[in-house]
Image (cartoon, helix red, strand yellow):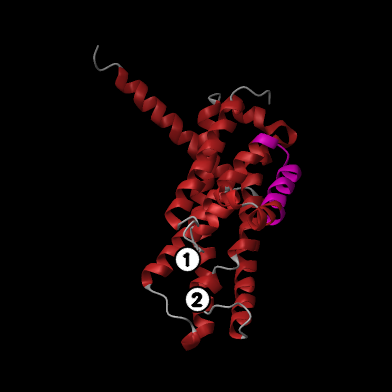
Amino acid sequence: MSAVPAPATRTRGREAAHALAAELSKLVSLPATWLTLGGTLVVNPILAIAFTLAALRGATGTRSAPDVGLASVGYAQAGFVILGVLAACSEYTGGQMRTTLIAMPRRALQFAARHLALAIVVLPAAAITAASGVVLAGAALGDTAAPATAGRVAGALSGATAYLALTALISAAVGALVRRSPAAVAVLLAYYFVAGPLLRDHAPAAKYLPDSAGFAMWFPVTDDASAVTPAQGALLLMAWTIVLIVVVMLGYRRWDM
């Protein structure tokens, strides 16, 4: 009798694996996924080149390859916001979500699998986005680039990569909450491109908000002792992501689809 729990454990594991495989299959088969990622990966190098040319003209105040190359991330994040929303909202069109929940009745498992599938897809895309800007900036700046240690470059790249991936997960959670792609995208882009910058300029406490904390992960303020450090920014952004996902998941288990 002591061996009875083992099959149940394996069954849960298989169920989780099947849920993840199903969510991955749906995400990678969605044309909007590749259009959004492709557009982001094309636009980001163009923006990085523009910032590099500005740096060569002395218009940016810095010639550090990580700083110049990652300046485009502030704009490229729009692609990850849109991707996160699309991953969450695509099945609400035409009642497809009801079919999904019939196949996967455990809503918490389905919700977690969807976010894990999104993380698997966006993490390499985020790494490529971050690295492409730094590589282009370093190549264009050449000998005129300000010295940057390997640790600084690695820290900036890992910070920007994590920021973009976590931004996509936050966007997916907001998309699941709103359940309408246009509305969710409008709310998130308004926050990241309008409300967030305004709050950073006028409210000191805004440094603890997701966008400001995330920026500190790869573009830290070194001349302000009260500024959020990269490690603190990472902890804050992860906390925002986890709390938002958990809160939305609790509601998701009770909503009428």
Give the residue type that dot 2 points to. Ala
Residue that mark 2 sits on: 65
Left or right placement of residue 120 versus residue 209 in this view = left
255 above or below 58? above
User: Would residue 35 be counted in the magenta stretch?
Assistant: no
Quarter occupied by the N terminus: top left
Q: Please report the residue visible at 67 percent of the width from the left and 40 percent of the height from the top.
A: 89
Answer whether residue 38 is visible to the viewer in this image. no
Element type at mark 2: helix
Element type at mark 1: loop
Q: Please report the residue visible at 68 percent of the width from the left and 41 percent of the height from the top.
A: 90
Crowdedness near tag 1: few (<14), some (14–19) or many (≥20) residues, C-alpha within 10 Å: few
Residue 70 rendering spot, x and y as whole percentages: 54, 68
Residue lying furthest top: 1
Quarter occupied by the C terminus: top right
- Viewer-side residue, 4 vs 49: 49
Task: Answer with the quarter of the image where residue 61 lies.
Answer: bottom right
Dominant secondary-structure state across the stretch colored magenta = helix
Dot 2 or dot 1, earlier in sequence: 2
Residue that mark 1 sits on: 222
- Viewer-side residue, 223 vs 3: 223
Answer whether residue 39 is visible to the viewer in this image. yes
Residue 175 rendering spot, x and y as whole percentages: 66, 40
Q: Please report the residue visible at 59 percent of the width from the left and 80 percent of the height from the top.
A: 55
Give the residue type that dot 1 points to. Thr
Number of marks in the rendered image: 2
In the drawing, what numbered circle is on residue 144? none
Query: What is the span of residues highlighted in magenta in the rendered image?
Result: 177-194
Crowdedness near tag 2: few (<14), some (14–19) or many (≥20) residues, C-alpha within 10 Å: many
Q: Please report the residue visible at 58 percent of the width from the left and 24 percent of the height from the top.
A: 253
Task: Answer with the quarter of the image where residue 68 lies.
Answer: bottom right
Task: Answer with the quarter of the image where residue 198 lies.
Answer: bottom right
